[in-house]
Amino acid sequence: MDPHFFKAAAAGNSELFKDMAREVIESLLTAKTKNTILHINIISQERENLSTKFVEEILEKCPSLLLQVNAKGDTPLHVAAKFGHSDIVRFLVERAKLPQHENEELESGVGAAKQMLRMTNNEKNTSLHEAACCENVDVVKILTKEDPDYPYSANNYGKTPLYMAAESSSSDMVLALLENSTPVSHEGPNGKTALHAAAMEFRFADAALRKLLEEKKNMIKETDQYGWTPIHYAAYYGNYEMVNFLLEIDQSASNIANKDRKMTALHLAVGQGHARTVETILSLSPDCYELVDNKGWNFLHYAMINFTDMNSVSIEIEEASLLDNNGETSQPQIDPNLFKVAAAGNLEPFKDMAREICPWLLLQVTAKGDTRSRHVAAKFDYCDIVSVLIERAKLVQHEDEELKSGVGASR
């Protein structure tokens, strides 16, 4: 393409093309990307100073450019949707509804508009995919209202527009898709659903989640190819608000284990050190603490592994000292075998262990001026999990004198 033509298209100057034959305008393409003058104009415009004038004038003279694609398979509508140019999107759709030839009926124009809306590029993206991917909510609303009954399928990456909207953490866009389209595919890559994508985000509105689950509540328990449910992902990333929302709908979802290591959401939350997520799961689904993975470990085992290994714990406990209520030095007597007992699913011995080891660990992390304490704190930054375990021990154990001593030490 001649640089003069390129600059004119980018600037929105249609005068240079006024006397050109239609065939000549169709042949004006950039060398590598094969963009037409319409593609160039739409790409070059700023959203704040958007104008449809050039697009209108060029399509009046050369309507075939409406469906002409570039090297990526993008129509002008794909590009406008990608850049969030809602006014241009609206005009292109309305223009496609008009008869392209004198003898055509209006109904054929409506069919042409739907054809344009459903056209996919080289990545199998429709213009709606592009709008959702780039978080252009206004464009999503326009496109879904124009073709509400079309079941948009997944692109080359296994993503549907709804999955993309959830992945971008846009509650407004998810609501727009669900309210304006039927049916809506929840499909995502590797067996994931839109709820899996939402579970990994932290800014999702409850209204969008409830709408997402309105017609398909069992999505909470749907697993991807790795056996992970949405709650697995929420727990792994420490999204405790999402965990709380999902478990309030279906508490049994916390019992589902993944494929490879048979880990539940609680295992993952503890393994990642997400104390508030652990607390949320235990408060809503307390029975899941008994569940073990393929090694026979429950969440207590993972909690202790995250603090230190068993040998170093027993050595440090033998060396450590605590001040009792009378200000005298006392040695915590803790049998390291209690770790194994707790890991096997027996919580009773752990109640006693929690009273002694948890305050000691907290003292190690918070003590000042002690080399060993700084070493422990630097190596094992999981004191929040210990705090959760202390609180759990309080709930199931009467506050006898020994427990009161433990609480005092933890402070």
Image (spheres, rainbow, N blue to C red):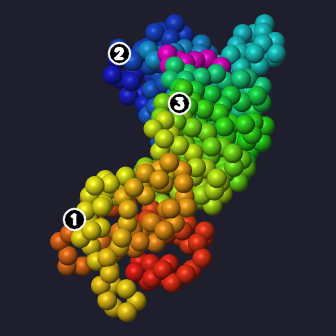
Secondary structure, mark 3, is: loop
Q: Earlier in the sequence, mark 2 or mark 3?
A: 2
Q: Amino acid at mark 3?
A: Lys
Image location of residue 153, percent across then percent down: 64, 21
Characterize the local packing of mark 2: few (<14), some (14-19) or many (20 or more) Cα atoms within 10 angstroms: few
Q: Is residue 125 magenta?
A: yes
Image location of residue 23, percent across then percent down: 52, 7
Report which residue position mark 3 lands on: 259
Report which residue position mark 2 lands on: 32
Secondary structure, mark 1, is: helix
Using residue 326 as the reference point, say whether residue 85 is left or right of it: right
CA separation in Å, label 1 and label 3: 36 Å
Characterize the local packing of mark 3: few (<14), some (14-19) or many (20 or more) Cα atoms within 10 angstroms: some
Q: Are marks 1 and 3 in contact (CB under 8 Å)?
A: no
Measured along the vertical axis of the image, is residue 341 above or below residue 39? Answer: below
Image location of residue 334, percent across then percent down: 37, 66
CA separation in Å, label 2 and label 1: 59 Å
Q: Earlier in the sequence, mark 2 or mark 1?
A: 2
- Indicate the quadrant containing the C terminus: top left, top right, bottom left or bottom right: bottom left
Corner quadrant of residue 376: bottom left
Image location of residue 320, percent across then percent down: 27, 73
- Residue at (36%, 70%) from the top-left corner? 333
Characterize the local packing of mark 1: few (<14), some (14-19) or many (20 or more) Cα atoms within 10 angstroms: few
> Label for residue 117?
none
Q: Amino acid at mark 2?
A: Lys
Which stretch did the figure color magenta? 117-127
Q: Is residue 339 magenta?
A: no
- Indicate the quadrant containing the N terminus: top left, top right, bottom left or bottom right: top left
CA separation in Å, label 2 and label 3: 46 Å
Q: Are marks 2 and 1 in contact (CB under 8 Å)?
A: no
